Amino acid sequence: MKKIIYLYALLIFIVSIEIYASEQPAGTISGRVLSRTNEKPLVGVTVRVLGTNLGAITRGNGTFAISNIPPGVYAVHFSYVGYKTYVNANTSVPSGKNVNLEIYLTESVIQLEGAEVRSSYFIKKAETVTSTQTLNSEDIRRAPGVQEDVLRATQLLPGVAVTSAGRNDLIVRGGAPFENLYVVDNIEVPNINHFGSQGTGGGPLSIINIDFIREVSFSAGAFGAKYGDKVSSITNISLRNGNENQFGGKATLSATGFGLNLEGPTNDNGSFLFSARRSYLDLIFEAAGFAFIPEYWDFHAKFNQRLNSSNTLSFLTIGAIGSVKLNNNNEENRFDNSRVAVPTQKQYFSGLTWKHLFENGFTTVTIGQTLTDYSTFQNDENLNKILQNDSREAETSLRTDVDLMVTNTGQLTFGNQLKWASKLRYDVFVAGFFRTDNNGIPQELSVDTTFKTYQNSTYFSYTQGIGQHKFTLGGRLEYFNYVEGKWLFSPRISVLYQINPVSAISVSGGRYYQSPSKIWLIGTPENMRLKAIQADQLVLAYDHTPLEDVKVQVEVYHKWYSNYPARLWRPYAVLAPNGFDDISNDIPFGLEPLLSEGKGYSRGFEIFIQKKLSEIPLYGLLSFTLSESNFKSIKGGYRPSTYDSRIIFNLAAGYRINQEWELSSKFRIATGQPTTPFLSNGQRDWENYNLGKRLPTFHALDFRADKRWNFTKYTLITYLDIQNIYGRKNVSNMRWNSKENRIEYGRSIGILPSIGVSFEF
């Protein structure tokens, strides 16, 4: 409570200094406009700042600059003959600063006689893509209750469920968190979270600094042939380049931590970005006497250099350090800590990218590396070790992509990716009492091993426009050296029928494969014979844009799973790690015998309506999902999956009162997920896997208020974010309390207020 009082006092103090605000110097919007098809600069693009009489025309290298813009938030309009007109909403112009934009326009292949040419606030890509939405950094920042976390923001999109209010795992169309792919500036990253769950894809908080984000593209299924080795979704995060015209920065202080960003030019054609952030949750938790005390840092650095008009080099590195201290000074704390797998993680990913433009396309080459050191342990209440996991997962990749316009209406994309993991090391101990087979016999695990894996993927994709319609045909040939059936081919197809300039129907389908998570392979020697998971998908979509700033999308989908990891010692269950790793609750990390005999399906209906911020200062989105997800293991018939949320509804809306004040709110409701009941001895009744009573319905209302002050040489931004404003303690899981011999429910903490202050200079 003292923390909240102090932070509110800080906010009041900041508000009180508004009367001292002096003259607010104008800002500048500059940047480059490129063709999305071949990434060449576009000359002669008309750029206008809506709501003003200011504008510019792009020069020979695609650059533009518009000065004397009063501080505020604007929509910037881009129009060019032969390309779709685009409006970049939410362009924030701080006092006396330059804002740098990088805009990609898509060629217009729809030519209907007498059709009205309209602007669009939504990014239109050349290839035929269903189930895809795009967000920018301001969309993420202003969303209430998401804590400026890119993955929490995507949880608002259709088809995405959550495991709990305290985690950002993506449950996409019934799939487990390990089925999702994360790509950051062309680098595939296994997990982009602090304290990320090993072998899966979720965690409590993303390490990606949203101030660096240019665009986030989220595909919920039936994505094209360019990406693979995941069967549910892609979150493709493109980071912006630093400001080439002006040095600047930003200092942020929030309820959970503080950070510093710096950016600026390195020379005439180069720029840098840098940030460092640290949480002070450890100070708060320790002062409050909590038993579990987390601490983390993260660091970002990006350098971009245009060598000449045809060649660009960029380097990116992002790292994070996280650790947890335990307060075991009393019996209650020791018992609470005995039910948690305590993580310490050191991770980084980095990549060097060369981009070369040629006459009718471009090529991109990225060499990248990811590395995570895991050190996870769990003690019983007497401080005896029952789990110890010291692992290192490192992987190097070389990726080459080529995009070609082979005709005026035909685009060919092809490429190859080689990945080799030469530093896989596992030193793992699991106590036998907590790792029992299907007869209840203890099966202690003690492994100290290293091994290597190799993967290669070659893909092609061709998109052809036929009048106002188009189709995409593609395929992937994949090789995994550590699974049975090492060579796998995945066909992909998509067709779009343009009904009129504002409405279209599309159908997409394909086959998708995913290799087993590395840590599953050490559960038993037989796990080295696991097959790649297979999922066949079909999506039918209707897309309608009734207004320039409003989009309506309706989709139906069906996924068929096979070769899914089934649990030999839990023969009615398939593998579904959920991030709540606790050896006393279940065998963690897939460290058990697995067979590729599971089957399943997921099907559903989705509606998505989005209103972008425009000259009408109201924005928001509505998403509704009706679905079911069922799996079949070694024994028994089809049962609801662990992540079977039948109904999900999200409504988020905001209103910009003026250039200084903005209010927003979000409401979410979802049916509870299935549970497995407990027997009287505290063991789970695995024969009734996922047939127990569902968890209570999840619902919560969040609220956020943002206020900006523009001073002579800097801008001050404050916000108040209140999560779960009516204090509902949502249930996220249930487990057995061995101390009291009863079932207990994991609940959220109720109302969670937060205050933040950002100082831009």
Image: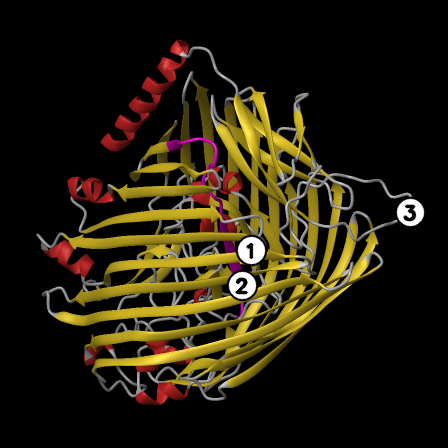
Residue 121 is at least partly visible in this image: yes
The mark found on residue 218 in the picture is: 1
**In the rendered structure, does residue 241 fall within the stretch colored magenta?**
yes
Kind of residue sitting beneath label 1? Phe
Picture coordinates of residue 572, whole percent (x, y):
43, 81
Q: Are marks 1 and 2 in contact (CB under 8 Å)?
A: yes
Query: Residue visible at 53% across and 70% down?
Result: 228
> Which circle's residue, 3 or 2, is located before the other in the chain?
3
Give the CA distance from mark 1 to mark 3.
33 Å
Residue pointed to by mark 3:
113
Query: Residue visible at 51% across and 65% down?
Result: 644
> Which circle's residue, 1 or 2, is located before the other in the chain?
1
The mark found on residue 233 in the picture is: 2
Kind of residue sitting beneath label 2? Ser
Give the CA distance from mark 3 to mark 2.
37 Å
Label 2 SS: strand
Label 3 SS: loop
Picture coordinates of residue 96, whole percent (x, y):
47, 21
Residue mark closest to the camera, 1 vs 3: 3
Front position in the image: 387 or 137:
137
Give the CA distance from mark 1 to mark 2.
7 Å
Q: Which residues are magenta?
A: 231-249
Front position in the image: 585 or 480:
480
Picture coordinates of residue 120, whole percent (x, y):
71, 41
Query: Residue visible at 63% across and 72% down?
Result: 460
